[in-house]
Amino acid sequence: MAMLAVTAAVLLPLAIIVLTAFKPVSEVNAFPPTLLPQDWTLDNLTRIVDELPFARLVLNSFLFAGGVTVFALVFDSLAAYALARIDFTGRRTLLIAIIATLMIPFQATLVPVYQLVSDLGWVNTFAGLIAPRAADAFGIFFLRQFFLALPRDLDNAARIDGASEFRILRSIVLPNAIPALLTLAIFTFVNNWNDLLWPLIFTTEREMGTITSGLTLLTGPGGIVPYGVMMAGALVAILPLVIAFLLVQRRFIESIATTGLK
């Protein structure tokens, strides 16, 4: 019973989003509110398509979140491998410095990062959206912990055979770390897909926005929020995330169970 109650509490917001997306304006603003629509409608979804460059916004979201995910996996895995499998002077100090950056609020670095992106002429470009997030301290630490759990005998045997460090990473470590890589990919993709502040600041053109930042354009005069339309947009925005999770859920659960275990 406790599990059912927790499940219901978790799914209730999702149910409200789905049902509100198909309510007419009169029912969305009705008091007392109702959960199920009395008159189902597609007007909210139609308004999103009519008033926004919807296809472009969705494409931008995929390019932004997908680009950050790809680059983060590459750079995070390289840094994590060096910190976990290679002995060099200052390794511990470097690890502490990387972890310390997790304590710095994102907002504290927003202005200097924007200034740098502006100086490079990358405002309203995918380079400006993706490059500042091409590596992540959490991802480096997460992969490092997983790499530490892998047997080092494999590395030593490969080195004896003359394999380079990059070859060891590519042929031995990464194939054994697929669950961790998939988990990090999901976290990175979801966080960037749902991000609102970053695209709002680094893009000023309507056609360069993402689906999350694009929905803010639907706010009416005086800050009136069309909740039915917003819920329809939220429904469309979360569908790719749900599909992505369903495709890799087995690997995701496996990585949670094995990461950090010796």
Image (spheres, rainbow, N blue to C red):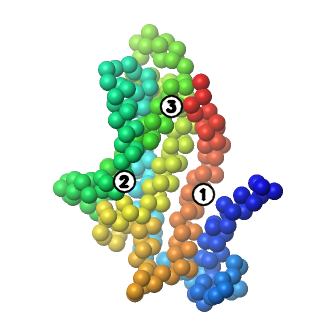
Q: Are marks 3 and 1 in contact (CB under 8 Å)?
A: no
Residue drawn 41% across the image and 68% down it: 213
Q: Nearer the viewer, mark 2 or mark 3?
A: 2
Residue 96 appears in which quarter of the rendering?
Answer: top left
Visible residue check, residue 197: yes
First of labels 3, 1 by sequence position: 3
At label 3, the amino acid type is: Gln
C-alpha distance separating marks 2 and 3:
24 Å
Along the line of sight, the residue nearer the viewer: 98 or 237: 98
> Is 229 rendered above or below residue 237?
below
At label 2, the amino acid type is: Phe
> Is 16 rendered above or below residue 158?
below
- Per the image, label 2 sits on a secondary structure element best described as helix
Residue 29 pos. (x, y %): 59, 86
Residue that numbered label 2 is attached to: 106
Q: Are marks 1 and 2 in contact (CB under 8 Å)?
A: no
Along the line of sight, the residue nearer the viewer: 105 or 193: 105
At label 1, the amino acid type is: Val
First of labels 2, 3 by sequence position: 2
Residue 231 appears in which quarter of the rendering?
Answer: bottom right
Residue that numbered label 1 is attached to: 242
Residue drawn 40% across the image and 77% down it: 217
Which quadrant is the C terminus positioned in? top right
Q: Is residue 70 left or right of residue 250?
A: left
Residue 94 pos. (x, y %): 34, 30
First of labels 1, 2 by sequence position: 2
